[in-house]
Amino acid sequence: MSALPRVTRRRAVTAAVVLVLLAAATVWAVLPERAAWTAQDLRITVRSGPAGDQPVDLDARFLLPRERSGKVPAVLLAHGFGGTKDSVRQDAESLAARGYAVLTWTAQGFGRSTGQIHLDSPDYEVKDAQRLLDWLARRPEVRTDTAGDPRVGVVGGSYGGALALLLAGQDQRVDAIVPSITWNDLGRAFLPQSAATDATGVFKKGWAGVFFGSSSGGDDPACGRFAADVCRAYLSMATSGTPDQAALDLLRKSSPATVLDRIKAPTLLVQGAVDTLFPLSEADANAKGIAATGTPVKVAWFTGGHDGGAGPGSDQDRVKFLTAQWLDHYVKGDGAAPGDDFTWSRVAGFSAMDRDLVTNGYSAPAYPGITGTGNARLTLTGSAQPIANPPNGNPAALSALPGLGSRLSSLLSGNVASDIPGQHATFATAPLTGSIEVAGAPALALRAASPTGEAVLFVKLYDVDPAGAPTLSAGLVAPVRLTGLPERIGDARPVTVTLPAIVRRLEAGHTLQVVVATSDQAFLSPAAPATYTVAVDGQLTLPTLVGTAISSPAAIWWYALGALIAAVLLGLVVLLLFRRARRRRRVIAVNQAYAGTPLVVTGLRKAYQDGFVAVEEIGFTVERGQVVGLLGPNGAGKTTTLRVLMGLTTPTAGEIHVFGHRLVPGAQILSRVGALVEGPGFLPHLTGYENLRAYWRATGRPWEDARFDEALEIAGLGASVHRRTKNYSHGMRQRLAIAQAMLGLPELLVLDEPTDGLDPPQIAEMRRVLQRYATDGRAVLVSSHLLAEVEQTCTHAVVVNKGRIVASGPVEEIVGESPSVAIDVTDVPAATEILTGLGVRSVTPDGASSLIVDMNGTPRAEVVASLVRAGVGVDRVVPRRRLEDAFLALVGDNSRGSGDR
Amino acid sequence: MTASHTNPPGVPPAGGLPPAVPSDAAPAAGRSGAGSDGRDATSAAERPGAAPRRTDAAAGYRPSRTLPIVAEIRRQASRRRTQLALGFMVLLPLIILVAFEFGGGGDSDDDRNGGGAFSSLVDLATSGGLNFALFGLAVSAGFLLVVVFALFAGDTVASEASWGSLRYLLAIPVPRARLLAVKLVVALGYSFLALVLLAGTGLLVGTLRYGWHPLGSTIAAQIPPGQGVLRLLGILAYLAVILLVVAGLAFLLSVLTDAALGAVGGAVLLWILSSILDQITALGSIRDALPTHYSDAWLGLLSTPVQTEDLAKGAISAIVYAVLFWGAAFYRFTRKDITS
């Protein structure tokens, strides 16, 4: 094989086609589709502030569907905290492609907008949004309900979600809102209190720090771009852990909780179950507040949130679908009213593809809140335990990693959470007898005693598998600040603690552990060291929820797989039937003229793809009983002819008939031909005997037809027949190959250079074997480049040179005595004269003392007698032979083969 | 040299060669000469008028009986590489077992790498026979099984070509399509056998050493042993399907080249290339079309309920690729000139 394939036209075309297809596929995959929307970046100046006199320059982008008929409804799309209009770019584009005019902007205090961060204050950010509604109403492309009232939905997540709620509460022009992962009461979100008391909650320092730290720029290095009052509130809260009234008022003002009763826009609330910042209870409060006034509300939970990110693909698809359905109905006016059914998802396992989690979706006919539709009660056991509060909250237990992104799997498989020895008490249930599908906020009764009368505690619920590995679902903890505690646990009164809502399937055999800890890295705990005593009595209440599984799109792929397999099988069957029919036609077609002749080759021509013509035109016949020699120099085309004869190579032109059957690759008539072509081919790891057996097994013919003993006798390998063929000499392999060709005693035996590698006695034996073989109606075709071999072995000969036949016929005819004689004489001119007088046909001088005489029937004795009588000395009289004549005439003067042409 | 000097090629005993044709149908030797024109009118005229058999093939020859599957299985079974590959499939679980036993107790605290799906399999490997077998599959699926499938499928035709025995099979004649089909079936059979051996040995030694326990994974619930066996079978089936791509590619290369090593190496090379491309997320949706993209989808069978979407996609992708490769192999082989 050459290192580089020859460049032919066919190959070039194939390569070009493949390249073009590859390039097209790449371009198709990489190039975005022509956008279905147009976008325009602009700056909108709005008047902000309580008096509406502070100009703020908003960095905005306005997108319109490229193809629209008439005016289109609008969507105001708000971004999350720390983001810009670019953070919601993809959502904006997909909404615009759905037929909405989309206005996104960077909220004041962020990005390239001016102004300061007021935390969605009704006087600032919400007022800005009202001015943007005015702006939308003036746009000629945007549909309006009445003059100045655009048909608009407001969509946003987190910071943008609260803005949507607050805007809908403040401005009745909003037609629908889709707030996601957002808060109800900002004070409660940052100062959560899970116990049923009035004490101020525990400062969520982790998340607060993440947000406060995300603003840069501004004049005051301490405050960044935060408004002075917001900055002051943060600094005071973060220092003391307890807010002053001004801070509480500020947080209250930025809370949708204050405006829920005024929201008339149908609301789709999307909340994440993996969210330690705004847990499911925030959306629950929003839903209850809005629904109380009769406004349509729909709730959806997904496995994600501020800790969990956008969630698995199936959840993202569900949220996108719900959003589009909501807007289409309530803003655009398309589609049926979305029901108030509730959908959620639960982790099912890890995804094989992206090494993240996979969730299953479920739906229930109505939103059950975070108390579920049922209850499971489990008894917790464990005695009262003393736990230490570390000074300044260090070291602290770890529950979640705020702001560190979304390793869903680590949060849900429990690799993060850890507790500090001595700082936590554990209360456990017995192993579960059956699985429990928890969806909601578990509750328990906690008793605590503290020497200071106060305690900050963190209550967590671990799911512990039978191997003992605990998992803190979504990293959620219930911070508790208790006041008025007795010093002794015996005097403590139970207080109900409601844990954050979780969505989890608790498997049978798992145990649940309630851990009460004194510190948590995400929260600010008291700086002074103290030792509390805690006890959890009685029962743990788990809200349960059973839903119907939302069918996964996987089924479609299984149908597709089934269809594919069916199509492949069908194609295979059709192909087989077609081939069988074609083969049957071919197999029974017999050329009656050649039906009894072992081999008829007519007009054979073989030109290789690279243009080399190995066989120009060859035609000959092998009859029964003949041993035909195919004689020619190396490269004359003998092997190519035999290759075609074995069906290994397809001829360019011409036909071969074996017993009247046209020979094509794989023709059944080949079963009556035995062959040795281009040297032996054996499985090197098998012995000679095993090779013959393996070969005969491959024929599928009856064992007794093989005539093994005769073949082995011909091979004559003796005991060596049981050695591996890789250790054979060249001659041994050759003999074994001849034996293999003779297995089953085929009627036509084709041998390519059979005596190659044999020693003279073996050659003599082989000659006899072949001559014997051809008796009884069999025929042998032997190729050779050795004249003597053909002469001694064959009954007939075909001489080939340069791809053409130059002579053919019975060997005795062409090898036998020719009419010419070579005579060496002492006097050439005299001899010529005498011979001419005798009436011979021609006399040709050949060298200094030799003459070639065409006798024309004159007896040799008479010629010699005449010459001697005339006094010419005769040194030598040699009868010439025709084959030699022919062979030498062709080859002798030019020993180069046709391969060198 | 050999014994041939003392046993020269023997002449068949007298009468050892039975007549090839009934004597009345045999023309006398040399009655008609070999004619260079190939059209011998006299021989046609003198031919007895006996009607030929329908196919005139040799007695007992039927194309559909050539190269029986059993014969091909024996051909391959006698090869050292078959024995070694299958033997290693049995050996590997034992090596892993020994490594676990002497490797320091499998404390996984040091190598907590964030808790991917794979690390959880490592942690759980010693928790029972099912998990042990699963671990053996997981560490082999990426490369070892690829090489084994490529070896069995890629070596099959090319090695016959390189020994020179291919032309003798075709001259029997084994129909080319049948030759390929038998070779393919047997190669796939050995590949699947290797897969089953690996899992079966892992299950056996794992169960003997670690006991018969539920199939565990850290994220989903434990799967009871009975169902765990079904899941394991499902994983085996999926691996078998996804590796059809390697088998297809190696088989195609095996038909295109006479160098067995080139076919095996080429298939493994392209598989690795595809794996690397699949790591480059910038390629976007092109990656979905890569044959290796869904190669890890069997992990979906470890969750409860099972995640089957990627399994279906992976199976579709693998079958499409395999059918394309095999189709190309058959198309090429049934038309090419055998020059080896």
Image (cartoon, coloured by chain):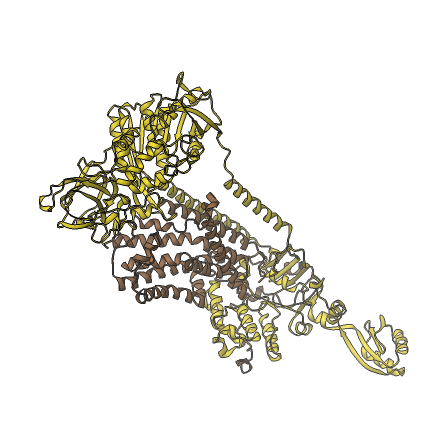
Task: Answer with the quarter of the image where residue B77 lies.
Answer: bottom left
Q: Is residue A439 above or below residue B128?
A: above
Measuring from the top left, give residue B263's x and y in whole percent: 51, 59
Quadrant assignment for the C terminus of chain A = bottom right
In this rendering, the answer to whether A434 lies above or below A696 is above
Give me the residue at 83% from left, 79% from top.
Answer: A824
Q: Which of the pair A764/B135 is nearer the observer?
A: B135
- Measured as percent of width and height from the top left, residue B76 is found at 45, 64
Nearer to the camera, A512 or A861? A512
Q: Is residue B30 left or right of residue A463?
A: right
Identify the residue at the far top of this view: A147
Q: Position of residue A622 (x, y in %)?
A: 63, 64
Vertical relation: A107 (above or below) B235: above
Could one spot residue B128 in this view of the protein?
A: no
Horizontal relation, residue A293 to residue B318: left or right: left
Based on the displayed image, in which of its 4 quarters is residue A673 positioned? bottom right
> For this rendering, which residue is in front, A657 or A429?
A429
Describe residue B93's horizontal placement relative to residue A484 as left or right.
right
User: Where is residue A563 drawn, in percent x and y?
Assistant: 41, 43
Q: How many labels sit on residues?
A: 0
Which of A537/B188 is in front?
A537
Whether residue A828 can be seen here: yes
What's the colour of chain A in the image?
A: yellow
Q: Quadrant of the N terminus of chain A?
A: bottom right
Q: Tell me if residue A349 comes above or below residue A137 in the rendering.
A: below
Please, which residue is most extreme toward the left here? A490
The chain in brown? B
